[in-house]
Image: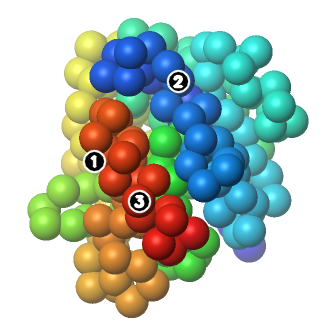
Amino acid sequence: MIKITGVIQAGGRSTRMGGEPKALLELAGKRIVERVVDALSAVLDDLLVVTNTPERYEFLHLPMVADRYPDGGSLGGIFTGLEAAGGDAAFTVACDMPFLSPDVVRLVLARAGDADVVIPCVNGQYETMHALYAKACLAPMEARLRAGQLRIVGFFPDVRVLEIDAAAVARHRAPEVAFMNVNTPDELAQARALAAEIG
């Protein structure tokens, strides 16, 4: 049985929100990151947070690790979480995804043994922050980071990638909802309206 760690990426700077950490904004009475933790903990027992500001996330009572490559963008955060993961693989999500679906998470995790990366692909776009990365990804990821090649999908040719299509996701939740993240005040307003409707 493959052991999987859930990794929450909370390292990004929230410039489009006026510097307010997106994850700490409230939605339907809960901080967005708490909604993320609730969805993940319904599926996984082992969670950790990648952040360079641990004091902001102490209230979650989860293990935290500092980004090994603070200038490495999202790829650096994914690498850090995967390296720190106690399991054989890391299921990585962003801290600002308020409508994560435990069923869609399970859909990805169910294929964990079949590839090194298991990732939803919607309209030709990989959902890199809702994906499973096996430890086999560490070496090719780090090679890219050291070379300053920070595109997350840049290392994909070096590993086995399994795509989950949009139709499979849609059986559980509309992809545009399941993978929604909150980057701007407009998106926050949309998310609040949606939360009032679907919870």
Q: In this view, does 140 lie above or below 53?
A: below
| Three-letter code for the amino acid on which mark 2 is drawn | Pro
Give the class, few, some or many, for how many residues have Cα within 10 Å of label 2's Cα (few <14, many ≥20): some
Query: Quick one: 170 or 131, which is closer to the camera?
Result: 170
Q: Residue 54's spot in the image, x, y percent? A: 72, 18
In this rendering, position of residue 37 left or right of residue 133: right
Q: Name the residue under label 1.
A: 156
| Three-letter code for the amino acid on which mark 3 is drawn | Ala
Q: Nearer the viewer, mark 3 or mark 1?
A: 3
**Residue 194 position by quadrant:** bottom left
Q: Residue 81's spot in the image, x, y percent? A: 60, 35
Marks 3/1: CA–CA distance = 36 Å
Give yes or no for contact between labels 3 and 2 (Cβ–Cβ under 8 Å).
no
User: Of label 2 and label 1, which has the lower sequence position?
Assistant: 2
In this rendering, position of residue 101 left or right of residue 46: left
| Residue at horizontal 27 percent and vertical 85 percent from the top | 167
| Residue at horizontal 80 percent and vertical 37 percent from the top | 60
Q: Residue 105's spot in the image, x, y percent? A: 54, 69
Marks 3/2: CA–CA distance = 20 Å
Q: Mark 2 points at which residue?
A: 21
| Residue at horizontal 34 percent and vertical 53 percent from the top | 190
Q: Is residue 10 above or below residue 18?
A: below
Q: In this view, does 152 lie above or below 93?
A: above
| Three-letter code for the amino acid on which mark 1 is drawn | Phe
Q: Which of marks 3 and 2 is in front?
A: 3
Q: Mark 3 points at which residue?
A: 193
